[in-house]
Image (cartoon, coloured by chain):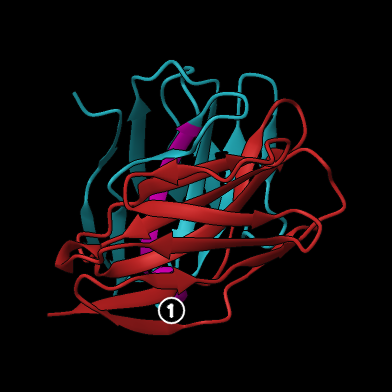
Amino acid sequence: DTAVSQTPKYLVTQMGNDKSIKCEQNLGHDTMYWYKQDSKKFLKIMFSYNNKELIINETVPNRFSPKSPDKAHLNLHINSLELGDSAVYFCASSHAGGTGDFGPGTRLTVT
Amino acid sequence: AQTVTQSQPEMSVQEAETVTLSCTYDTSESNYYLFWYKQPPSRQMILVIRQEAYKQQNATENRFSVNFQKAAKSFSLKISDSQLGDTAMYFCAFMMLSGAGSYQLTFGKGTKLSVIP
């Protein structure tokens, strides 16, 4: 039983396209997150979201938008993809003060 | 803003030996959590160990232990009896409440550990 799942695990697309990455957690956590890991392995928070508030990292371009249909899902939509968006994107979830449980990551390659 | 610093980009250790990975952080908060995550080549983020700032006792998980020095804002990870499967990137991370009940992780830049047979 996968705790945090992401689809797809690999995504190759061309510049200018719009794509989505889906995330689901079955842990009953209140908060979900998206992290970006760049080519130098640096992990940075993009968004955190619970049923009360969306917190956006101010450095994230507005081409990126999280969408949460319900508490167990937080999808990431990316418009007008650019070469610099190539990275590994991790979804995670947590409860108050708990550990961050991570999904397997989605490797996005923009050509 | 919180920052996490890992000053050792790469380290190596002989199999069965002990290695210590360093981590320092900067915060004005008194209540927070600290973690070490392992990322093997499979890229899965795996929690290694967790420490609550209000606990003075250092956390231990089998061969992994931490040296938590709150006043010095230091949180090092010691791996005893290193095994080949310990080869991975290790990330130190800081967590605290960040608005509306949200807890987000701030990561260091990672230490690449290689265990040599």
Q: Quadrant of the N terminus of chain B?
A: bottom right
Q: Quadrant of the C terminus of chain B?
A: bottom left
Residue B10 lies in quadrant = bottom left
Chain of the residue where label 1 is placed in the rendered structure: A
Q: Picture coordinates of residue A20 (x, y %)?
A: 36, 45
Q: Is residue A94 magenta?
A: no
Q: Is residue B85 left or right of residue B79?
A: left
Asked if B96 appears above or below B87 in the picture, the reply is: above
Furthest residue in direction right, as rendered: B28
Q: Picture coordinates of residue A86 (x, y %)?
A: 37, 70
The residue positioned 22% from the left and 29% from the top of the image is A2
Which residue, given by chain and number where applicable, does mark 1 sit on?
Answer: A40
Q: Which region of the structure is painted magenta?
A: A82-93
Colour red belongs to chain: B
Residue B101 or residue A98, whichever sits in front: A98
Asked if B76 appears above or below A62 in the picture, the reply is: below
Residue B100 or residue A23, whichever sits in front: B100
Colour cyan belongs to chain: A
SS for tag 1? loop
Asked if B6 appears above or below A12 in the picture, the reply is: below
Q: Is residue B114 left or right of residue B74?
A: left
Q: Picture coordinates of residue B59 (x, y %)?
A: 52, 43
Q: Is residue A71 left or right of residue A86?
A: right
Task: Name the amino acid, label 1.
Answer: Lys
The residue positioned 34% from the left and 37% from the top of the image is A22
Furthest residue in direction left, as rendered: B117
The residue positioned 48% from the left and 71% from the top of the image is B21
The answer to whether any part of residue A63 appears in the image is no
The answer to whether any part of residue B102 appears in the image is yes
